[in-house]
Image (cartoon, rainbow, N blue to C red):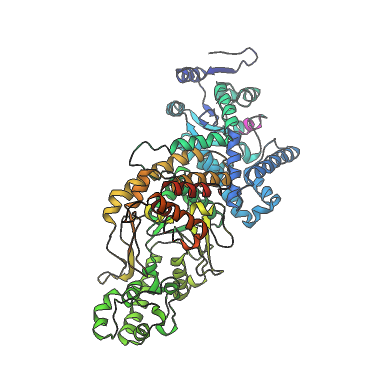
Amino acid sequence: MDVPADYPLLVKIDTTRPDFRDELSAIIDRFDPSLICVDYFDTLVRRTIAPEDVKRIACERISRMAGSNDRGSALYAARSALEVECCRENEASGKDLEFTLPALLERLWHSESFLQDMTASHFIQEAVETELSIECSVQILDHGLVDLLHAQKRKGRRIVLASDFYIPLVHFKRMLERMGILDLFDHVYISSDALLTKRSGRLFDTIIDAEGIQPSKILMIGDNIHSDGASANSRGIPSIWLNREHQHAEYAKLSSTSGNHDRIESRLMQIFRHDDRTDVFGELSLTLYAFIDDLFHRLKQNGARDVFFMAREGQLLRKLFKKYQDSRGLSGESRIRPHYFKVSRRATFLPSLRPVDEEDFFTLFRQYRRISIAEFLGSLGLDGIASTLRAQFPYSLAERQEDLPTSEAFAALLSNSFFRDSYEAARLTRQSAFRRYLESFGADFEHVNGVHFVDVGWKGTIQDNLRNIFDLLGQPYDSLKITGHYLGLIASGNVRSDSEKSGVIFSCIGHLSRNFHVFNENRALFEVALGADHGSAQSYEFDPDSGTPIIKESEFEEAELFASKIRPLQRNLKSRFQAIDDVLRDTFYPRNRLLAFTARQHARMVLRPRQKEIHWFENVYHVENFGVFEASTFGKPARGWPNPLKGILFYLKLRKHPAAVDLGFWPWLKVYQQGGSLVALRYANSRFKLIGE
């Protein structure tokens, strides 16, 4: 115990000593206070980042919620300047040099025009929630000190918290609740509520008056020698100074490295080391992280309360989105509810259609025209009527027509009474069942800015179907705006003002997004890697016994593939996703730099794959369940590998007439299979040169 002569009421404790809590407990008993007043930051909790970096990260995230990827630093500078203004104005009005976060945010909203795409109230709510979630995610509780205070409370002493902080009491209590210590305190005093601080001593006056107790019977415990020591002593309150200078030095060190982007990227690179011979496409986790990260901010910008991840690729995406929110401690109103929505092109097609005489089946025929009557029925989910129809239909159901919509067979089908009756009955039933299924999620569709769907991409056909279904369902669905958030888009489909689509990672809609060629190089990888553990939705029906809506699913043809290859890959992707989040969650790493770094890592997978990745991809397949019902495989040609002369001829053809060469699902792999390793290397190098920062 050390009692400096100039601070007779102050006792100093060295917190680097392992037994300092025992010493603290003995000193408290020696003072024998009726009321223990304890500080919060760097007393009960320490942060894993520099305190000012909480604000920097918050500004980065808020900027992105407002739709800007590059204004975080400018927003932080504007916020810092406004903090000074607010403090000076409050002091001039008779208060202390203090501010309150909501008032500051309102001024920030008025001063920065790009924030005004959000309403002021929405912006303030999201900004407060953002800062609160960051604070909670970077705080580490001193459990030993908390246990000590609980022991003091059991001795009959009141415990109150006193903190100089700008977050209002109502939100500060939420932070204490999330840290699990709200019940420790008999009362909480925060400087921002009355704009009176410990630093000036005036918050201690408030505590003395409110508690109705003599200052000598109060004991202040904290880490700031002025605010928790000298200021308390000036009011006659004895104090214990917990010397945390080592922690303050650590903050200075953290602050100097927190914006080191090269260091952040070096840490990320460590995550992608491939030690396991069965581990493939690890960098895909970074692409998925970049997608989920941006998706979250887009949804926040739009005020979304619910988001629907469309089957089947949405199953893993939903799990990653949930993991992303969990790691930020989001709950209640600050959390977006993610739903797994069992849909498919097939299941949503028939409910999206009008009566036969009003329908052109555009969603199907814009992509699939050379199909059979049987494949047309399958796309409608009317496979079950095929046997009855076959007995009375003059054309082959199995024979593919060169252009089905203009064929005699199709005209005959549309005039067939059995088909027409079956079509209309199923159409109306499935619309009704779909509506009941949608209502089962309990989402608030009437008081939100539309409905948000998430899928892998590439044209948004399911969204087009959903838009048509909503139009046919009537109120409130026909007036709802639908927004689709896709990993990538290569065509717009049927875009309307009330049905918007965006490619979050890559898109060619309007303009070609940066590094489109990298992310578009192997779209099949996304489809295979994001496979689900169940069959595709086939139709929406009603259970004949209970009358509840059910989703009829097709046979799970990929069950063995999922168990042997997809599930192990997804397990590794989820693990790496969490590791990436641990690195990036509490940094202010610019979005544009993240996308550029992600593009380079993604390019490694699709342009310089390892042999085990090539082998993995050549032994998987993808099953189409709409239009044509076929499995797509990616194996090497049966004729074997090309000799050098054939490889050169292929390369020359690729150079002179690239449009004439069908490069399939994964262009690099096709070049590798047809032209050999040297030609594939030339192709990869030419694509790498196009990667932009």
Q: Residue at x 65, y 33 (%)?
A: 197
x then y, percent, for residue 504: 52, 55
Name the residue furthest right: 92
Front residue of 556 and 180: 556
x then y, percent, for residue 146: 45, 29
Front residue of 180 and 497: 497
Q: Is residue 416 depicted above or below 259 in this figure?
A: below
Q: Quadrant of residue 433?
A: bottom left
x then y, percent, for residue 21: 46, 21
Q: Residue at x 30, y 85 (%)?
A: 418
Q: Is residue 580 depicted above or below 474 in this figure?
A: above
Magenta segment includes 376: no
Q: Is residue 627 depicted above or below 191 in this figure?
A: below
Q: How many marks?
A: 0
Front residue of 221 and 447: 447
Left or right of 230, for residue 551? left
Q: Quadrant of residue 99?
A: top right
Name the residue furthest front: 645
* Part of the protein shown in magenta: 201-206
Magenta segment includes 203: yes
Left or right of 96, for residue 61? left
Left or right of 86, for residue 302? left
Q: Residue at x 58, y 62 (%)?
A: 510
Is residue 178 visible to the viewer in this orientation of the structure? no
x then y, percent, for residue 369: 41, 74
Q: Main secondary structure of the magenta part?
A: helix
Is residue 253 visible to the viewer in this orientation of the structure? yes
